[in-house]
Image (spheres, helix red, strand yellow):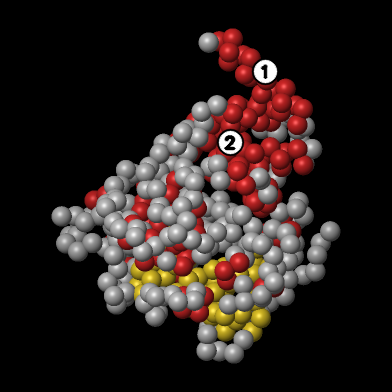
């Protein structure tokens, strides 16, 4: 089985994105706390085999584009009381992201 | 309505103070890590499959310690992949226990 | 470079409402059940030709030998060699490879502490850790309390390690949730301007490379 070829990355550093707010069953590497949150692409990490498929013995191909996305802590947590510039970064696969309006 | 989060998905949950005490690793911690690592490098299994099995262990095992849940999950994964049977594990443990008792 | 001690004398009064069962390795093996199961899996794996006894022994020796020395080597070089630091921050995997440090399938991202920014690493979903650089992770890194609280109350977590950030410093948390592994480049301690690289390595603690503490004070 040779899945579809991987196209070019759909996002670049600085792009505003939102993580899907969805709760599919199965092994996922997207923590609950970040689903539905908006952030900015910090960097493109490259493409990697898909853990959502690897976890069940499949080959994880085609690879998926992976990005580090930076979120403002105040956007992620209600009542966050740290520094206003505090951030949290996570790695998010492209299929969990959609473009959003840019003031995240 | 989101599904209940997996037991491994801890980000943002309330928690107590962190136990900062340092512990030496026990020999079996290193042995189980080594057995898994060798099988992973030989292509018998992926870290993603092991993680899925760790996420699925019973809650008392999950809370019972890092290497404890690893060991149970690796057993589950090896059985799932038909590398070993539960009967073989039980028989081997009984034989090892008998040999140890005889040596005491 | 292990055995860091921390000040435990802090106040937990305003924080957590729930205390998890201690999930350290302490006193968890009374019956020997998991040790026996481990030996059974090892022997069955050898009998079935999945692994050899030699391979298992070699990896146990590797885990025994690998501490935080490789991390300290990377950090001290970055402190003394601006060109290396630039390469390290741009492509951690390649910069580690320059020192013959492998990443075993993951990619290394190095994040720099400055006067304005402090970084801290956590893995909320499991316990991802740059093992080829720092060895096996400490128990607290794998604990439920560290994994749960570091993302939403990182400043109080740092306080438990005795690290209080000044008001003007922004805190960047990195949840190591996929294919990257993270290493913090701590600030070079003041008063070490004349120190050679080898001596600087002694100031680079494990905790400073996870981001829960600064590098050791030379004073």
Residue at 44% over, 75% down? A80
Q: Nearer the viewer, mark 2 or mark 1?
A: 1
Percent from the top left, x then y, of residue A72? 47, 78
Q: Residues within 10 Å of mark 2 (few under 14, many from 20)?
A: many
In the rendered structure, find residue B36 and report the number of the disc placed on it: none
Count the numbered circles shown.
2
Residue at 66% over, 81% down? A98
Q: Are marks 2 and 1 on the same chain?
A: yes
Residue at 37% over, 44% down? B21
Q: Mark 2 or mark 1: which comes first in sequence? A: 2
Residue at 32% over, 52% down? C205
Find out whether the residues at labels 2 and 1 contact each other: C-beta distance under 8 Å.
no
Q: Gap in Å between the C-alphas at discs 2 and 1?
A: 19 Å
Q: Nearer the viewer, residue C218 or B99?
A: B99
Quadrant occupied by the N terminus of chain C:
top left
Does C54 appear above or below C170? above
Does C41 appear above or below C155? above
Question: Along the horizontal axis of the image, is C78 left or right of B98?
Answer: left
Quadrant occupied by the C terminus of chain C:
bottom left
Q: Is residue C208 visible?
A: no
- The chain letter under disc 1 is B
SS under mark 2: helix
Percent from the top left, x then y, of residue B34? 57, 37
Q: Is residue C67 visible?
A: yes
**Residue carrying label 2:** B32
Q: Residues within 10 Å of mark 1 (few under 14, many from 20)?
A: few
**Residue carrying label 1:** B95
Percent from the top left, x then y, of residue C183? 43, 59
Q: Nearer the viewer, residue C96 or C28?
A: C28
SS under mark 1: helix
């Amino acid at each position: 089985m040779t899945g579809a070829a991987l196209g070019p990355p759909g996002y670049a550093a600085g792009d505003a994105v939102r993580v899907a707010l969805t709760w599919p069953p199965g092994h996922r590497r997207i923590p609950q706390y970040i689903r539905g949150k908006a952030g900015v692409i910090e960097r493109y990490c490259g493409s990697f085999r898909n853990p959502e498929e690897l976890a069940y013995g499949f080959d994880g191909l085609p690879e998926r584009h992976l990005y580090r996305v930076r979120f403002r802590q105040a956007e992620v947590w209600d009542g966050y009381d740290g520094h206003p510039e505090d951030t949290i970064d996570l790695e998010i696969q492209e299929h969990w992201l959609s473009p959003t309006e840019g003031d995240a | 309505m989101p599904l209940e989060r997996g037991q491994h998905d801890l980000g943002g949950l309330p928690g107590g103070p962190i136990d900062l005490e340092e512990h030496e690793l026990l020999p079996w911690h290193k042995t189980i890590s080594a057995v898994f690592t060798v099988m992973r490098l030989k292509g018998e299994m992926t870290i993603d499959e092991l993680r899925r099995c760790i996420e699925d262990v019973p809650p008392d095992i999950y809370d019972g310690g890092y290497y404890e849940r690893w060991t149970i999950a690796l057993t589950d994964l090896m059985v799932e992949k038909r590398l070993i049977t539960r009967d073989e594990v039980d028989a081997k443990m009984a034989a090892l226990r008998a040999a140890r008792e005889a040596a005491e | 470079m292990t055995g860091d001690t921390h000040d435990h004398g802090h106040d937990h009064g305003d924080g957590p409402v729930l205390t998890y069962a201690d999930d350290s390795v302490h006193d968890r093996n009374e019956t020997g059940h998991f040790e026996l199961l481990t030996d059974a899996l090892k022997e069955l794996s050898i009998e079935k030709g999945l692994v050899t006894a030699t391979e298992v022994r070699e990896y146990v020796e590797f885990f025994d030998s690998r501490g935080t020395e490789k991390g300290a080597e990377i950090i001290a070089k970055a402190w003394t060699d601006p060109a290396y630091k630039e390469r390290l921050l741009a492509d951690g995997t390649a910069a580690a490879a320059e020192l013959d440090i492998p990443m075993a399938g993951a990619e290394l991202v190095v994040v720099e502490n400055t006067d304005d920014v402090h970084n801290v690493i956590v893995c909320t979903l499991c316990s991802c850790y740059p093992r080829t650089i720092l060895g096996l992770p400490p128990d607290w890194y794998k604990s439920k309390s560290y994994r749960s609280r570091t993302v939403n109350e990182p400043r109080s977590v740092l306080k438990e390690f005795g690290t209080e950030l000044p008001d003007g410093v922004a805190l960047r948390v990195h949840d190591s949730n996929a294919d990257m592994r993270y290493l913090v480049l701590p600030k070079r301690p003041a008063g070490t301007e004349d120190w050679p690289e080898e001596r600087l390595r002694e100031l680079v603690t494990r905790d400073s490379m996870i981001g829960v503490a600064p590098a050791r004070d030379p004073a």
